[in-house]
Amino acid sequence: MVKDELKKYFEMLELPPDASLRDIHNSYLRLKKLYAGDSIVLAPLGEEFPEKKRKKVLDEIEEAHLKLLAAKKDEPSRTAFLFEDALSPEKASSQPEKAVDLPTTGPSLRKIREKAGVDLSEISKEFKVRIELLKSLEEERFEALPEAIYLKVHLKNYAVFLGLNPAKIIDEYLQRYQAWKKKK
């Protein structure tokens, strides 16, 4: 059951209370684009929808997005699927932090993505990145990956799409990437 305080945020993003993280993210992007200053949809409204009002709506959309992401992240069920044998379903709700504390590797990211039922093509389309790069990321083929500054962006997008902690993913993954670079 959705808390009453979250209902308004789901309504703001035009979503049902059982929306997934992907649905939340997609709705957020769609509405942001819709209310952008150069939106063809809003152009005919002109003075009826002034800049100040549009800015207020964009701020509300941003707030709703952040609140819903935080609420979804705090759900015990979000971490239950992270690693196949890390926790039994009974323990997952009482000890979700253990799944999060496991090391982030390319193969573990792949398992998380597969458990979430997300295809690489979905991430590829969303962030306009080649599937081969995403495969290299999951297989930890460091030689095929871009420099660290670009890799950070790809890791962040990957993590956000799956509702994971981007800072943790980036930090742990880049540690292995940097170690590989030093050996080379």
Image (cartoon, helix red, strand yellow):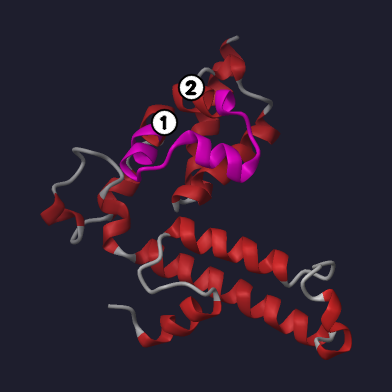
In the rendered image, the quadrant that contains the C terminus is top right
Q: What is the x, y in percent for residue 132?
A: 56, 23
Q: Which span is picked out in magenta?
A: 110-133
Residue at figure coordinates x 59%, y 40% from the top left: 125
The amino acid beneath tag 2 is Glu
Farthest residue toward the right?
Answer: 47
Q: What is the x, y in percent for residue 88?
A: 13, 47
**Which residue is denoted by mark 1 in the rendering?**
105
Farthest residue toward the top?
Answer: 184
- 175 vs 126, nearest the viewer: 126
In the rendered image, the quadrant that contains the N terminus is bottom left
Q: What secondary structure is marked by label 1?
A: loop
Q: Is residue 97 above or below residue 156?
A: below
Farthest residue toward the bottom?
Answer: 48
Q: What is the x, y in percent for residue 92?
A: 19, 54
Q: Please check the rendered image and state whether residue 132 is part of the magenta-colored stretch, yes or no.
A: yes
Q: What secondary structure is marked by label 2?
A: loop
